[in-house]
Image (cartoon, rainbow, N blue to C red):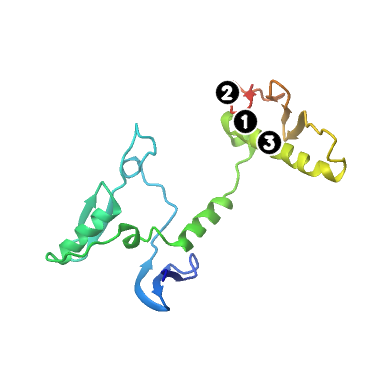
Amino acid sequence: MNIEIEEDSSYPASSIIVYKEKRNNVIQRSFHYEIIEEGVYFNASRSAYTSIFKRRNIKFQINIAENFEYKLSSTSSSSVANMWEKAINPNSKTKWAGILIFGLQLESVKKARKAKNKNRELKSIENCYDSTIIKRAKKFGSQARELLESTSQNYYPKDDDISIKAIDYSINNYDFHIDFGKKDLIKTKQHQLAIVQALDKAKAS
């Protein structure tokens, strides 16, 4: 019988989350979490790069109550969880999964983080770097092209060959021309960008 997962949570309205694992409607184990903070990027000494060439491991830490002693692990959350178990129960043979100890599996926290990122206010184009302007233009143009092509069947027969060759639009003082022809050019006519950047399907200038 598969394990059923339940989360009693109203996060982020409440920082308390109760995580339960059930089998045949019987609780096998449960964890009580209090989320101190989520969505925070640590400074460089506590962060990890995904590049194999610049990798630093995150240090998971647990506070041992009386002496405020920190047991650190630069390898995994499970390692520091088991160090904590040995510190409070030296003869224990219990092995902990760090994901459960640190609440990394909590769906309510994941959903809150996604919602926070989704609702993050976009910067005005005047406050964006050139690379961001080009990136947005590329995505906007690509999605606009797909939308036009997908709705074309509402106005033209399926046998007709519909080809979106170019899109022009303006945002504040920026005029954009996206050419979907052979060269696939993205150009800004005003506030010319100082860089020429190769993109997946386009050159930007």
Under mark 2, the amino acid is Gln
Lower position in the chain sequence, tag 1 or tag 2: 1
Marks 1 & 2, CB-CB < 8 Å contact: yes
**Residue at image mark 2:** 197
Foreground tag (1 vs 3): 3
Q: Residue at x 76, y 43 (%)?
A: 150
User: Is 38 rendered above or below residue 173?
Assistant: below
User: Which image quadrant for residue 167?
Assistant: top right
User: Which image quadrant for residue 21?
Assistant: bottom left
> Where's the C terminus, which quadrant?
top right
73 to the left or right of 103: left
**Residue at image mark 1:** 134
Q: Which of 99 and 2 is in front in this view?
A: 2
Under mark 1, the amino acid is Ile
Where's residue 152, x and y in %?
82, 41
**Residue at image mark 3:** 142
Lower position in the chain sequence, tag 2 or tag 3: 3
Q: Which residue is drawn at 34% across and 62% down?
A: 100
Label 1 – label 3 distance at C-alpha:
12 Å
